[in-house]
Image: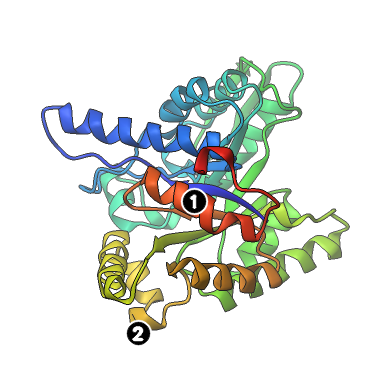
Amino acid sequence: MQFGLFGGARTKRSVGIEDSQGYQSFIDYVMEADRLGFRHLFMVEHHSTGQGQVSASMTLLAYLAARTQRIRLGTAVVVLPWHNPVLVAEQAATLDLLSGGRFDFGVGKGYRQAEFDAFCIPIEEASERFDEAMAVIRQAWTSEDRFSHHGKRWHYENMLVEPAPLQRPHPPLWLAAGSKDSIRRAAREGYNLLLDQLASVEQIIERIAIYREECARIGRDYHPNMVGTARALQMIRSEAEREAAYATRRRVVGVIGDLARDKLAGRIEDDTAPLLGTPEEIIARLRLLQAGGATNILLTDPNASVANLRAFAREVMPAFTSTVPAAAE
């Protein structure tokens, strides 16, 4: 089993000082994860939320590429309907070079109505815009010569995308998916799979099985690390802390929005998605995930706490690896 991070910095609307502190604390968090041996960071992208979520994900990842050595740096996800695909291909290839080939390119079509409204893009066009953008990006990264593209949304003539990515033919592709059709599509079209932090343990196991079966059907080699499963981390030390942890979970779900509340229609106490509990309870939850094929776990911590990372590395990771990371001791 391997562990990584999922999420991003949080800022506040201010004169800039608090925003700077928000980014710096997240940078410190990722640097510590790198020292502790966490495998991945997947960075979110959101716009116009009022919640201070990361908007320029590849810019922040480029900075982190210079401050880290081993951790892989990914997007989760670049919402392609909002972006010029050639510019995205150039930015992603540049990031792959700057990171020494540690970049993972996670993409999605988006789901938040308010964000599409802010860009004045009909959400009904998300799928067709995504498909065209990915076709352009794949062509940009695999064409040896200049290319032209004349589609419904984008037009390019005699285009040459520079630089080429370091990883060939391109960085690993990841797709955020949850429905059966989208999971099967991810398998067929060469994507690794990102599973969300709200899905129950049972849903995660079911989705991994669908992905694995589709890989087998089309003759694609499968490895468990091709699936990344996001899980909220809320470690407690006593029963007295449990209710506060549930309150935090309610708040986080509220920030994620109406879609999250629909998925979690019921009591937070019955929610099996988060790694919420004592170290022993978290280990037990992880063992259930591991038995179902989820062996690439991406931790999301709303506080981006270095202390929480160290505690997880010291008290949970040894149950799945042979040693305690030296930085956690």
Q: Residue at x 59, y 23 (%)?
A: 99
Residue designated by label 1: 109
The type of residue carrying mark 2 is Gly
The secondary structure type at the circle numbered 1 is loop
Q: Nearer the viewer, residue 215 or 249?
A: 249
Q: Residue at x 63, y 70 (%)?
A: 287
Q: Is residue 226 left or right of residue 122?
A: right
Measured as percent of width and height from the top left, residue 26 is found at 36, 37
User: Who comes first in sequence, dot 1 or dot 2?
Assistant: 1
- Report the label total: 2
Q: Nearer the viewer, residue 67 or 80?
A: 67
Q: Nearer the viewer, residue 282 or 210?
A: 282
**Looking at the image, residue 141 lies above or below residue 305:** above
Q: Residue at x 50, y 19 (%)?
A: 66
Q: Is residue 127 visible?
A: no
Residue designated by label 2: 266
Q: Quadrant of residue 137?
A: top right
The type of residue carrying mark 1 is Lys
Q: Residues within 10 Å of mark 2 (few under 14, many from 20)?
A: few
The secondary structure type at the circle numbered 2 is loop
Measured as percent of width and height from the top left, residue 259 is found at 36, 68
Q: Residue furthest front?
A: 329
Proximity of marks 1 and 2: CB atoms separated by less than 8 Å: no
Q: Quadrant of residue 283?
A: bottom right
**Looking at the image, residue 58 lies above or below residue 278:** above
Quadrant that contains the N terminus: bottom right
Q: Residue furthest left?
A: 15
Q: Residues within 10 Å of mark 1 (few under 14, many from 20)?
A: many
Q: CA distance from mark 1 to mark 2?
A: 28 Å
**Looking at the image, residue 323 lies above or below residue 156:** below
